[in-house]
Amino acid sequence: MAFKRNFIWFLLFGTLIGLNETVIGGLKIPCHSVVLSSITLLLLAIGRFRFPVKGSTLVITAIALLFKMNSMGIRECTAPALLCGPTALAMIGITFEIFATLFIGRKQFAYPGYLITCALTSLIVFGLFAVLQTFILQIWDTARCANYILVRGPFTAAASAALASIALILAQSSAIYNIHRLNPYLKNSLLFTLIMALWIFGYFAG
């Protein structure tokens, strides 16, 4: 029931993560994977804070994956492409869901749980992705594998935990919830229009 009643919000969070994966994911910036993953984890943490129920992260991740593949287009959804961005995103979402269930549960203000979830998700996903690319797909060399496991993973763990802590503090501000004072039909209409605009933007920006 909660999923059906709040689906517009699940759609918004999934869209924002998909937009991050499309826009930031397409930029050539230093520490690209760290920035990309930290923002994704931040949005997952906010989504879990908003909906502290089992499965909420998986729903948001599924929507983000659809956004990502919509942005890629049918011709770009090749096996190598799917094994890169979408696979990493799916790994982050699934791992976050597991640790959130263990350490957060149904509590909104479980700060240590959110920080532990973000940190452990970063370390596990970066490690697994590096092993996948190096030893299974044999695309990376061992130096890049070590960099992901020993440098980028811990860096992302620290960055995502710091961002999540700031976001959770801000989330307690009454100003954050002013949008809930709007007429429900007006609020949902505005959110739906924004979401549709972002999907169209993502399609052409991908």
Image: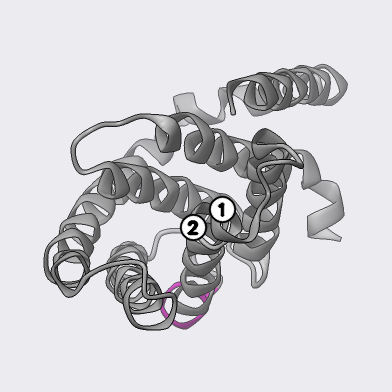
**Residue 133 on image: x %, y %:** 38, 71
Magenta span: helix, strand or loop, mainly? helix
Residue 198: quarter of image: top right
Q: Is residue 62 above or below residue 67?
A: below
Q: In whole angstroms, how far apart are the C-alphas of marks 2 and 1? A: 5 Å
Residue at the (35%, 36%) spot, across then down = 170
Residue 85 picture location, percent across and down: 50, 53
| Quadrant of the rendered image containing residue 185 | top right
Residue range of the region highlighted in magenta in the rendering: 101-105
State yes or no: residue 103 in magenta: yes
Q: Is the residue 102 above or below the residue 166 in the image?
A: below
Q: Amino acid at mark 1?
A: Ala
Give residue 68's position: percent from left, percent from top. 63, 43
- Name the amino acid, label 2: Cys
Residue position marked by numbered label 1 in the rendering: 81
Colour setup of the view: one colour
Magenta span contains residue 176: no
Q: Is residue 46 left or right of residue 157?
A: right
Q: Which residue is mark 2?
A: 84
Write the residue at 70% across / 46% down: 10
Task: Judge whether 119 appears above or below 201 on screen.
Answer: below
Query: Are the residues at dot 2 and dot 1 in contact (C-beta closer than 8 Å)?
Result: yes
